[in-house]
Image (cartoon, rainbow, N blue to C red):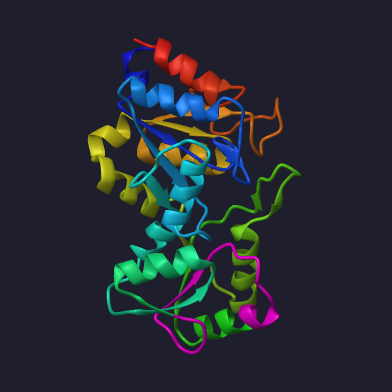
Amino acid sequence: MDAIDRPRVVLCDLDGVVWLSHQPIAGSVAGIARLRAAGHRVLFVTNNSASRVEDQEAALQHIGIPAEGDVLTSANAAAMLLQPGERALVCGGEGVVQALERRGVEPCFDGDADAVVVGFHRTFDFDGLARAARAVRRGARLIGTNDDATYPTPDGPIPGGGSILAAVETACGLKATVAGKPYEPMAMLVRAVVGEEAAIAAAMVGDRPSTDGRFARTLGCAYLHVWSGVTPRGAVVDPEPDASFDDLSAAVDSLLLAR
């Protein structure tokens, strides 16, 4: 790696990079600590919209990673697409409700709305699908927190927020505006936190090229791919990463050796 690859800011995905269902991946906790000790700012950029930010911060703290103010979620990015005073029908989890309220948007769960915001949640059912589709047909904008088809767990992938979003899109006949990685709203959120120059000079560490890799390209920064998440080892990675590693710990070793 040359000097441009030793960034001041390191952007880390959570699921499949730092942990699997909040179970830390070997070496990840120490790796984050080593980056910070070397002067890097570490931000956790996640498409997980189900949990509130403070719950994700607390989960990181529980495994030994202080993270207050360092978690950026796709729910936050989705909320930026609405204006204070608007009303949004929530087809998602507590993280979406929190992000909307902090934006000054009124969350609701039925009836007409300015927008429908769809994210991962385990209570998704036919009635929820019908409410979301009905609101969109009546004029609400359709916003997805992310379109990840699956979500990594220690027991293998489970359906993700993108699977739920696809059902709503099919039911209402419209395509959603997607806020999370790899799309521009999440890039805008990162730039708002670290500044445009730091975002371009950052490194994105991720396990899913279709989101993390493409997100790095959206920001214009380096992509470091790890094999500890959803991508089967040896699979073709597109976009091609700047470097690939077994896990976050190995990626940190390389970053700290760079000039």
Q: Residue at x 43, y 53 (%)?
A: 73
Of the 4 image quadrants, the one containing the N terminus is top left
Q: As displayed, is residue 137 above or below residue 193?
A: below
Q: Position of residue 178 (x, y in %)?
A: 47, 59
Left or right side of 102 for 169: right
Observer able to see residue 146: yes
> From the image, which quarter does the C terminus lie in?
top left
User: What residue lies at 61% left-to-right and 27% top-to-bottom?
Assistant: 26
* Region of the chain picked out in magenta, as a range: 108-129
Query: What residue sits 61% from the left and 32% below the top?
Result: 25
Relative placement, left or right, of 147 versus 125 is left
Q: Nearer the viewer, residue 29 or 224?
A: 29
140 to 237, vertically: above or below: below
Q: Residue at x 48, y 24 (%)?
A: 31
- Can residue 179 be seen? no
Taking depth in this image into account, of 85 and 167 the one nearest to the observer is 85
Say whether residue 91 is magenta: no
